[in-house]
Image (cartoon, rainbow, N blue to C red):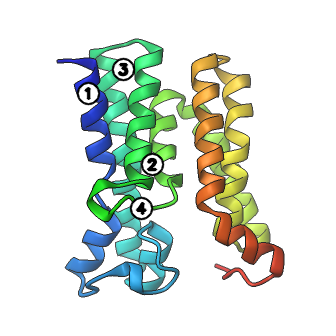
């Protein structure tokens, strides 16, 4: 199988709007018109239900993990694994099926890095949970986890290609959270 074809397929898998589909199944025609307007697990959980939010979360994580695990098995080259992970992540945040307006990328990035370095994700999850527990903001927990991942990968694996991937993903996650950051600074962000 062509490596470039694999990268392309990872994008199209990443672009599948799990949250939108789950919400439709449960009677919400367009989750983008409800709650925060996001297609991710947090908005699905708030608008549709916790179970549906969890299904969305698992689906979005899987979109990142499955292509990377397959790449590790079939290709095995760190650079190609990183490109395939990035492609899936870009598919989620810029999905062709939704005119390139997708989710914020946190769950899909988590799946990518869970395949690459499960230990880094465990520590990152602890950071996320602590911040959410302490401040009650999912967005702040997500941003903290995105910020921490490059440092965790540096300590745990030291592989430059994955550290670079995590930096790029963190920048894009911060970009996709620009409205949340604005609300956090104004004290207007929704608490958990």
**What residue do we see at 50% from left, 71% from top?**
42
Q: Name the residue under label 4.
A: 102
The quadrant holding residue 52 is bottom left
Contact between labelled residues 4 and 1, with CB atoms less than 8 Å apart: no
- Mark closer to the chain start, 2 or 3: 3
Q: Residue at x 48, y 82 (%)?
A: 46
Dot 2 falls on a residue whose secondary structure is helix
C-alpha distance separating marks 2 and 4: 12 Å
| The image quarter in which residue 165 lies | top right
Q: Find disc 3 in the rendering and name its residue.
A: 72
Number of callouts: 4
Circle 3 Cα neighbour tier, 10 Å, few/some/many (<14 / 14–19 / ≥20): some
Q: Please name the residue that numbered disc 1 is placed on.
A: 6
Q: Please tell me whether residue 18 is drawn above or below residue 117 in the rendered image.
A: below
Q: What element carries label 1?
A: helix
Q: Which of marks 3 and 4 is nearer the N terminus?
A: 3
User: Quick one: label 1 or label 2, which is nearer the N terminus?
Assistant: 1
Q: Which residue is drawn at 41% across and 61% down?
A: 102
Q: Distance between the residues labelled 1 and 3?
A: 12 Å
The x, y position of residue 118, in whole percent, is 53, 33
Residue 34, given in percent of the width and then of the height, sits at: 43, 87
Q: Residue at x 58, y 42 (%)?
A: 169
Q: Position of residue 185 (x, y in %)?
A: 82, 73
Where residue 85 appears, as percent x and y from the top left, is 43, 34
Q: Distance between the residues labelled 2 and 3?
A: 17 Å
Q: Residues within 10 Å of mark 4 (few under 14, many from 20)?
A: many
Mark 3 lies on a secondary structure that is: helix
Q: Which of marks 1 and 3 is nearer the N terminus?
A: 1
Label 1 crowd (10 A; few <14 / some 14-19 / many >=20):
some
Per the image, the residue denoted by label 2 is: 108
**Of residues 88 and 141, which is closer to you in this image?**
88
């Amino acid at each position: 199988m062509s490596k470039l074809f694999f990268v392309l397929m990872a994008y199209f898998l990443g672009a599948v709007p799990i949250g939108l589909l789950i919400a439709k199944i449960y009677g919400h025609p367009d989750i983008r018109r409800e709650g925060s307007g996001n297609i991710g697990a947090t908005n699905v959980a708030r608008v549709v239900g916790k179970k549906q939010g969890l299904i969305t979360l698992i689906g979005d994580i899987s979109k990142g993990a499955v292509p990377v695990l397959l790449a590790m098995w079939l290709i095995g080259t760190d650079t190609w694994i990183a490109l395939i992970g990035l492609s899936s992540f870009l598919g989620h945040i810029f999905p062709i099926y939704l005119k390139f307006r997708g989710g914020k990328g946190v769950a899909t990035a988590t799946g990518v890095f869970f395949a690459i370095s499960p230990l880094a994700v465990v520590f990152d999850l602890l950071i996320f949970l602590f911040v959410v527990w302490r401040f009650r903001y999912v967005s702040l927990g997500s941003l903290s986890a995105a910020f921490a991942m490059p440092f965790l990968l540096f300590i745990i694996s030291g592989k430059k290609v994955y550290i670079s991937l995590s930096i790029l993903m963190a920048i894009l996650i911060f970009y996709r959270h620009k409205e949340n950051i604005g609300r956090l600074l104004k004290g207007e962000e929704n608490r958990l």
